[in-house]
């Protein structure tokens, strides 16, 4: 195999993958893990290590419960999740080789505007899918076998984003597979969607508020969830089920009544730079899901 590679005159990444044969499918796990850390590590280092003090007023749960033990557990679960996501991608890749997907290869076929539109569409669909799948996983008979691992983290960190039970990982990976078969989607749009989705997920689990207060009164931007929104889902559990946008929680009446006051308290602290404990942020028992 190595000789073949070295003797190849027109050596490029694609011929390299071809020369590896089926092994190439599994080698996608390495770039996937690299992308995972390229997104999560900078957020973690900036907010949780290097500028922890400077960003103290932005902390959503003022009492830190998150610790090294939790982070290592989250990282372990996340690597497992990335491997499962990669296997789903490999399945899509194999289907694509057999001409079974709706993936197209030439960007010019639909143009750049459609490519960007397809990423937005996938994010919106995933948010809807997540809301309902998430509510289903909070159903008591399913909770223990799907979603409990994710809720082991009460004071969330960037590493909580992909800290899932393997069954939940498969559920979370389904939209990507669905798009590959039902939507005219370019390979780069699928990758772009997965990266955007990871970034939004990490922002939702940052543990610090980074969405500007001005967005909360803007006619359109108010629909974007601040980090506090999903953070409250981890500290209070039975509400705020959405992750990226507030639509479904507002429409279904599942947004916490305390949410506006809690968010205001975070912004007040940020404006005054005076950290103080939020009494209402005491966690409830996870078993009550
Ligand atoms: Zn949940
Ligand atoms: Zn979460």
Image (cartoon, grey):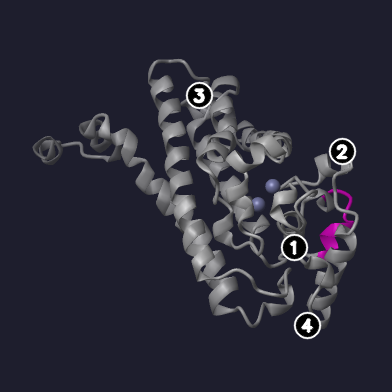
In this view, 236 is above or below 273: above
In terms of secondary structure, where does tag 3 sit?
A: strand
Left or right, 163 with reference to 234: left
Give the labeled residue for mark 1: 283
In terms of secondary structure, where does tag 4 sit?
A: loop
Assess disc 1: are there few (<14), some (14-19) or many (≥20) residues with their C-alpha within 10 Å of its C-alpha. Answer: some
Magenta stretch? 213-220
| Residue 159 can be seen in this image | yes
User: What label sits on residue 273 in the rendered view?
Assistant: 4
**Are the residues flagged by discs 4 and 1 in contact, CB closer than 8 Å?**
no
> Marks 1 and 3, Cα distance to the nearest angstrom?
44 Å
Between 223 and 161, the residue placed more toward the observer is 161
Residue at x 90% of width, y 64% of height: 261
Give the labeled residue for mark 3: 103
Magenta residue check for 218: yes
Magenta residue check for 246: no
Assess disc 3: are there few (<14), some (14-19) or many (≥20) residues with their C-alpha within 10 Å of its C-alpha. Answer: many
> Marks 2 and 1, Cα distance to the nearest angstrom?
23 Å
Residue at x 63% of width, y 83% of height: 53
**Can you give x and y, in whole percent of width and height, for residue 121 in the image?**
68, 34
> Marks 3 and 2, Cα distance to the nearest angstrom?
34 Å
> Marks 4 and 1, Cα distance to the nearest angstrom?
24 Å
Give the labeled residue for mark 2: 252
> Marks 2 and 4, Cα distance to the nearest angstrom?
35 Å
In terms of secondary structure, where does tag 2 sit?
A: helix
Instruction: State which mark lies toward you, 2 or 4.
Output: 2
**Quarter of the image holding residue 125?**
top right
In terms of secondary structure, where does tag 1 sit?
A: loop
Instruction: State which mark lies toward you, 3 or 2.
Output: 2
């Amino acid at each position: 195999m190595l000789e073949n590679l070295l003797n190849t005159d027109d050596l490029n990444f694609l011929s390299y993958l071809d020369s590896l044969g089926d092994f190439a499918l599994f080698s996608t796990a390495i770039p996937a893990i690299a992308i995972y850390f390229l997104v999560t590590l900078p957020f973690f280092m900036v907010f949780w290590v290097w500028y922890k003090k400077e960003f103290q007023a932005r902390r959503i749960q003022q009492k830190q419960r998150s610790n090294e033990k939790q982070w290592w557990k989250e990282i372990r679960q996340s690597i497992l999740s990335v491997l499962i996501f990669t296997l789903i991608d490999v399945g899509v890749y194999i289907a694509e080789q057999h001409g079974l997907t709706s993936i197209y290869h030439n960007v010019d076929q639909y143009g750049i505007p459609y490519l960007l539109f397809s990423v937005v569409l996938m994010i919106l669909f995933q948010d809807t899918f997540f809301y309902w799948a998430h509510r289903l996983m909070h159903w008591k008979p399913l909770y223990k076998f799907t979603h409990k691992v994710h809720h082991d983290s009460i004071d969330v960190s960037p590493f909580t984003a992909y800290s899932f039970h393997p069954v939940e990982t498969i559920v979370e990976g389904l939209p990507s597979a669905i798009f590959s078969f039902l939507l005219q989607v370019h390979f780069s749009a699928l990758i772009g969607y997965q990266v955007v989705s990871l970034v939004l997920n990490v922002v939702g689990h940052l543990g610090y508020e980074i969405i500007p207060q001005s967005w909360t009164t803007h006619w359109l931007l108010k629909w974007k969830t601040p980090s506090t929104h999903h953070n409250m889902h981890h500290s209070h559990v039975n509400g705020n089920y959405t992750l990226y946008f507030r639509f479904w929680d507002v429409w279904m009446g599942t947004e916490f009544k305390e949410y506006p006051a809690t968010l205001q308290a975070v912004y007040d602290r940020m404006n005054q730079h005076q950290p103080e404990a939020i009494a209402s942020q005491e966690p409830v028992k996870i078993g009550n899901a």
